[in-house]
Image (cartoon, rainbow, N blue to C red):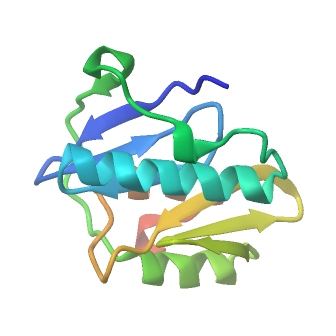
C-alpha cells in the first residue's frame, strides 16, 4: 500500500503531517526524523482501528525526500492547545477514543466514516495547521478551544 503524505512546515518550528487517503490521520514533530517516527505510529494506529492490518509498518522505510510533498502555507496566528486538551474537546463533541497507539489517540464517531488521530507528545502544543485540520473535520470552532 502506498500512501501520499503531506508534510507541512509549522509557522513557528517543526513540522506536521496529514495522510489524505486516511482522513483525520495527523501527527507532528520538531524534526523530520521525529515527524516520520510519529507518522508511522499514527498510520499504524489508524489502520488497526480500521482493521486494515495488512500493511506491516515495521518493514516500511522512506527511500528519499522526493516521496514527500511539502506544502508551505501562510497561517494566521491563532490559539493553539495540546493534544490532551483537544482530545477532551473531541469527546464532548461525541468522538470516542478507540485506541491508543504509542503517543497517538485514535478517535471515531458513530455518524462519521472519518477517524481522527491526535498526537499526544508530552504536553506539546499542536501545530496550528494540524489543529485547524482537526477542527474542520470535527466541527470545532476557535472559541471552543
* Residue 108: x %, y % from top left: 76, 64
* Residue 45: x %, y % from top left: 64, 59
2 displayed left or right of 144:
right
130 displayed left or right of 74:
right
Q: Residue at x 28, y 72 (%)?
A: 125
Relative to residue 74, is residue 89 depicted above or below? below
Quadrant position of the N terminus in the picture: top right
Please state which of residues 117 and 56 is positioned toward the viewer in this rendering.
Answer: 56
Q: Residue at x 39, y 43 (%)?
A: 17
Disc tally is 0
35 displayed left or right of 25:
left
131 displayed left or right of 32:
right
Asked if one can make out residue 133 in the rendered structure from this viewpoint, the answer is no
Residue occupying the far front of the picture:
59
Q: Which residue is drawn at 24% across and 31% down?
A: 73
Asked if one can make out residue 125 in the rendered structure from this viewpoint, the answer is yes
Relative to residue 116, is residue 119 depicted above or below? below
Residue occupying the far left of the picture:
12
Residue occupying the far top of the picture:
66
Residue occupying the far right of the picture:
110
Please state which of residues 32 and 60 is positioned toward the viewer in this rendering.
Answer: 60
Relative to residue 54, is residue 97 depicted above or below? below
Relative to residue 80, is residue 50 depicted above or below? above
Quadrant position of the C terminus in the picture: bottom left
Image-quadrant location for residue 79: bottom left
Amino acid at each position: 500500500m502506498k500512501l501520499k503524505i503531506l508534510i507541512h512546515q509549522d509557522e513557528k518550528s517543526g513540522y506536521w503531517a496529514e495522510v489524505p487517503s486516511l482522513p483525520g490521520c495527523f501527527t507532528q514533530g520538531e524534526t523530520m526524523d521525529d515527524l516520520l517516527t510519529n507518522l508511522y505510529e499514527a498510520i499504524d494506529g489508524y489502520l488497526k482501528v480500521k482493521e486494515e492490518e495488512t500493511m506491516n509498518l515495521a518493514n516500511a522505510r522512506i527511500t528519499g525526500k522526493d516521496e514527500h510533498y511539502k506544502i508551505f502555507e501562510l497561517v494566521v496566528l491563532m490559539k493553539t492547545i495540546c493534544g490532551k486538551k483537544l482530545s477532551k474537546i473531541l469527546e464532548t463533541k461525541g468522538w470516542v477514543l478507540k485506541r491508543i497507539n504509542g503517543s497517538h489517540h485514535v478517535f471515531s464517531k458513530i455518524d462519521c466514516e472519518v477517524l481522527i488521530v491526535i498526537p499526544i507528545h508530552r504536553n506539546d502544543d499542536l501545530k496550528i495547521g494540524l489543529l485547524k485540520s482537526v477542527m474542520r473535520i470535527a466541527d470545532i470552532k476557535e472559541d471552543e478551544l
